[in-house]
Image (spheres, rainbow, N blue to C red):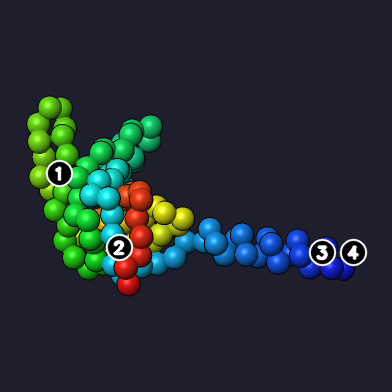
Amino acid sequence: MKKSLLSITLYVALAASASAQESAEWVQTSGSGDLTRASEVMIAPASKSISIQLPTTIKRGEIVYIQYEDSGNKVADSFMVTGITIKDDTCSIENKRNTAVGTALSDMIYARPCKKLK
């Protein structure tokens, strides 16, 4: 009984650690992702992400130039990378900024597949 309980506990601990989020400084993407803007989520909580093109390598602290279509028009924009986390093979690339009233908003890019380089 003790042996099986120990095995179950070990399995649960390994499974939890395998799927935990991990921070990264530098990642490799497939060159595409989904952008979710914090301001759009606040205005329309059911809004969907925008499919975007992005660089195949991204570092925390850099400005990433992204492209997407909006209402039939091609849009070029910039995205300051303030944080990167990875869970399984999905990266969450964050642009956190402060507003005039002192609250923080985070735009996010979700890229999959994605892997940690450093």
Contact, mark 4 vs mark 3 (Cβ under 8 Å)? yes
Nearest to the observer: residue 105 or residue 55: 55
| Relative vertical location of residue 95 with respect to residue 68 in this rendering, above or below | below
Nearest to the observer: residue 78 or residue 117: 117
Instruction: Tell me what residue is drawn at x 53 percent, y 58 percent.
Output: 19
Q: Residue 76 location, x and y as percent?
A: 10, 45
| Three-letter code, disc 3 | Leu
| Three-letter code, disc 2 | Val
Q: Residue 66 location, x and y as percent?
A: 16, 49
Query: Residue 67's mark?
Result: 1
Residue position marked by numbered label 2 in the rendering: 27
Q: Marks 3 and 2, how far apart in space?
A: 38 Å
> Of callouts 2 and 1, which one flags the residue occurring earlier in the amino acid sequence?
2
Residue position marked by numbered label 4 in the rendering: 1
> Of callouts 3 and 1, which one flags the residue occurring earlier in the amino acid sequence?
3
Q: Marks 2 and 1, how far apart in space?
A: 19 Å
Q: Is residue 36 left or right of residue 87?
A: left
Residue position marked by numbered label 3 in the rendering: 5
Instruction: Tell me what residue is drawn at x 75 percent, y 61 percent.
Output: 8
Q: Marks 4 and 3, how far apart in space?
A: 6 Å
| Three-letter code, disc 1 | Gln
Callout 1: few (<14), some (14-19), or many (20+) C-alpha neighbours within 10 Å?
some
Instruction: Tell me what residue is drawn at x 28 percent, y 59 percent.
Output: 28
Q: Residue 72 location, x and y as percent?
A: 12, 27
